[in-house]
Image (spheres, helix red, strand yellow):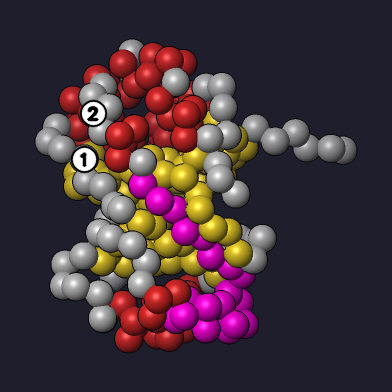
Amino acid sequence: MGCGILAIWHDIVPEHQTDVLSWYDREHHFERLAVPGFRSVRRYQAEPGTSPQLFIRYETESTATLSAPAYLERLNQPTPWTLRCQPQFRGNSRTVCERIESHGGAEGGCAVTIRLAGPMSAELRQAIGRACELPGALGWERWAADLQRSTIPTREKQLRGGEDRYAATILVLHTRGTEEAAACLAIMSPALAMEPQGTTLTGTYRLAFSASNFAIVK
């Protein structure tokens, strides 16, 4: 707990899907993991009815990693493949966060993401607690935005065109699969409906890629 999180959501221009996903798989995720302080990356694909298409989370030693010279150097010196792919992003949301809470200690094949424009309400906290009592609900996290680090101007940000979107608070609920995610959302829906209109973005995503710098003991 207390580590840094880089949370990203975006769509891809349809005709560039294969190239962008291959760039992530073969270059970009590993390039980020080579930066000192980066621990892991997970990329998720949207389930039907969820937008945008991708949810990506990088975990770092602290939020300071995400404004350190080594990381900013990569952001300002994009590779040729990055130069080709980042302009194909649409609706990019990118927020540097600190993980404030972590409950459950496990992750599954599915993640429910809730992006809030403000703090987490007491009603939503109670609802997510009830949801986590269901079979197949494995745990949840709360991340708080670091807007100062999120808004640092970089070459990569220029490539994407337009302004990135940001969230003040991000909740991630981990489940075994999509059926369990749907059951959890059904419990949380009344509390989510109480949030001010236009301030909450909810999605269900399945895990598509995972890599880390943690050593594997054989």
Q: Nearer the viewer, residue 128 or 76?
A: 128
Q: Nearer the viewer, residue 197 or 9?
A: 197
Q: State which quadrant residue 6 falls in.
A: top left
Q: Does the magenta stretch include residue 195?
A: no
Q: Residue 157 carries which label?
A: 2
Q: Is residue 203 above or below residue 212?
A: below
Disc 1: which residue: 164
Q: State which quadrant residue 158 falls in.
A: top left
98 displayed left or right of 146: right
Q: In this view, does 208 lie above or below 196?
A: above
Instruction: Tell me, yes or no, if residue 117 can be seen here.
Output: yes
Residue found 35% across the figure and 56% down from its top: 169
Quadrant of the frame with the C terminus: top right
- The amino acid sitting under disc 1 is Asp
- The amino acid sitting under disc 2 is Lys
Instruction: Tell me, yes or no, if residue 74 can be seen here.
Output: no
Q: Is residue 58 above or below residue 110?
A: above
Residue 187 in the image, given as x and y percentages of width and height: 43, 86
In the image, the segment drawn in magenta is 126-145
Q: Residue 204 carries which label?
A: none
Q: What element carries label 2?
A: helix
Q: Is residue 134 magenta?
A: yes
Q: Which of marks 2 and 1 is nearer the N terminus?
A: 2
97 displayed left or right of 101: left
Residue found 16% across the figure and 72% down from its top: 197
Give the alpha-carbon distance from disc 2 to disc 1, as whole Å.
8 Å
For the residues bearing labels 2 and 1, Cβ distance under 8 angstroms: yes
